Amino acid sequence: MPCLRSRTPYHLSSSLPLSFIPPSSPSRSIQSRGLAKVAMSDSEEHHFESKADAGASKTYPQQAGTIRKNGYVVIKNRPCKVVEVSTSKTGKHGHAKCHFVAIDIFNGKKLEDIVPSSHNCDVPHVNRTEYQLIDISEDGFVSLLTENGNTKDDLKLPTDDSLLGQIKAGFAEGKDLVVTVMSAMGEEQICALKDVGPK
């Protein structure tokens, strides 16, 4: 009798795992497939967000109430320099609002915007780089010398008549000219001229 008792529990305990394992394995494989699909969709979504971040890196947020005259702000997706700022008084049920009057830094157009002072505005990253002027082509493109010795040939002469006249006159006289290129939000334009003397 003791032998039968010892064998019976052993037989039941050994048979439970054998009957339990097979049904669970398909469900595990289905779950693993589901996890693989979720992981794939997550990676795709993350890749999409990284593209959005790359585009947003051309600007940075700044509270409207802290933007001052001669600062920069994005209005209607254009990089602008602020020429006038006025702030309205706080109402009973609203926020103080900032009224911006600004000039597009590339085409000179006047733009306006009204933003609550506590809200964030997009501010463009504006950079200025100096290049030595090497040549001016007949179609109005300039050839510039970069710091590493390469040439930059994708910029046109500025549209500002005064600056354009100075560059053409200085180049015709054979002077050694250095131009300042302003860049913001993927656009570039010559914005200033420095006369460093004859060549």
Image (spheres, rainbow, N blue to C red):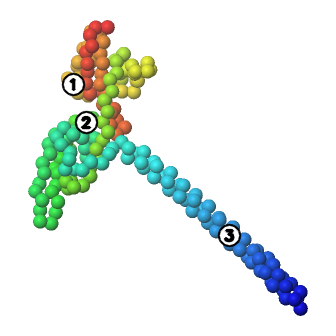
Cα–Cα span, label 2 and label 3? 60 Å
Q: Judge the density around disc 3: few (<14), some (14-19), many (≥20) Cα neighbours within 10 Å.
A: few
**Residue 49 appears in the rendering:** yes
Q: Earlier in the sequence, mark 2 or mark 1?
A: 2
Query: What is the three-letter code of the residue carrying label 1?
Result: Asp
- The residue under label 1 is 161
Query: What residue does disc 2 label?
Result: 105
- Distance between mark 3 and mark 1 Cα atoms: 73 Å
Indicate the secondary structure of the residue bearing disc 2.
loop
The amino acid pointed to by label 3 is: Arg
Where does the N terminus fall, quadrant-wise?
A: bottom right
Residue at image point 84% right, 82% down: 11
Relative to 72, is 18 above or below? below
Q: CA distance from mark 2 to mark 1?
A: 15 Å
Residue 141, position as x, y percentages in the image: 36, 23
- Between discs 3 and 1, the one toward the N terminus: 3
Q: Secondary structure at mark 3?
A: helix
Q: Say which quarter of the image contains residue 167.
A: top left
Nearest to viewer (mark 2 / mark 1): 2
Q: Which element is circle 1 on?
A: helix
Q: Which residue is mark 3?
A: 28
* CA neighbours of label 2 inside 10 A, class few (<14), some (14 to 19), many (20+): many
Q: Is residue 157 visible?
A: no
The quarter holding residue 54 reads: top left
